[in-house]
Amino acid sequence: MILLEEELLKKLKNLEISLENKIIKKEEYEKEKQKIQNELKKIKKLNEEPKEEFIKKKSDKILIYSLILIILFFAIFFAFRFFNKVEIKTLDDLHSLNLNGKLKPEQGYIYNGFSFVFYDDLWNTKVQQEDTVFYISLHYSPKELEDISLAGQINATLFDSSDFIYYTFDPLLSDQRYVALSAGEFVRSIIAAFNKIPKAACDKNETKACSRVPILTCNNTNLPLVYFKHESPTKVIYDKNCLIAQGEGLEIVRATDRMLLNIYGIM
């Protein structure tokens, strides 16, 4: 291809000499010159086509190799995460991870030496009474309850010696959901951790259901009593034999959890 190009250039040069020496006319020169230039263009095009093809193939290879490397990177990344993922089967697994600092703050943290983990939409901890460990589930964790005030003194001897604990509330509340939720949280805990028998009461005899249970308030009994008081502000009050969890709406649930965590010696 190179030799042919050189021959055509040489032929073009001879053609120019022939024109200068007036061997051929200018019309004939132009005609032959155009032919030679056309041939040179064809040769040039043929020489460039393999280069372009080579560059195109090279670009395609780079693209393919890049895609392969990206796929391998993600495959290795997800495989690493899969094989290093800890399978959580029980609450004890979560507590173990928490104690080793492997949970995010919203998943679990240590508070005053107690492990709290968020599982099944509840905050869970373990409380030990003598040789027995109890699992406690609450709607709120300690850090969410630090703003709730707690005042007064509890008659610990009375509560410890009694086999039962009464709980009372206002039966005329239009919305009993949060009081019921608070009472359920309290009852579940005292049965599990303290082996006490919960007994329902009302603070006034205004309904058919209340006619069948004791009417108890903090002012009319010396029995161990928990009063779920649906009003603001949110707080916990200990008045010897009477424990008051006070708050409106979900706040009464927060007050109940604050009271329970104090009884457990956590906060």
Image (tube, grey):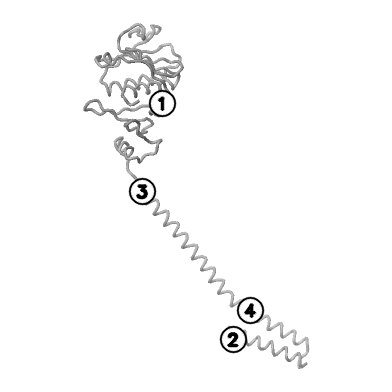
Q: Earlier in the sequence, mark 3 or mark 4?
A: 4
Q: In the displayed structure, does residue 41 sit left or right of residue 131?
A: right
The part of the image, by quadrant, that contains residue 28 is bottom right
Q: State left or right for residue 20 relative to residue 128.
A: right
User: Would residue 212 appear left or right of 20 to someone viewing this image?
Assistant: left
Which badge, 3 or 1, is on the more N-terminal residue?
3
- Point out residue 246 in the picture as x, y percentages from the top left corner: 41, 17
Residue 42: image tag: 4
Classify mark 1: helix, strand or loop: loop
The residue that label 1 is drawn on is 146
**What amino acid type should be assigned to the residue bearing mark 1?**
Glu
Q: Nearer the viewer, mark 3 or mark 4?
A: 3
- In the picture, which quadrant includes the N terminus? bottom right
Q: Residue at x 34, y 15 (%)?
A: 153
Q: Amino acid at mark 2?
A: Leu
Q: Earlier in the sequence, mark 2 or mark 3?
A: 2
Snapshot quadrant of residue 146: top left
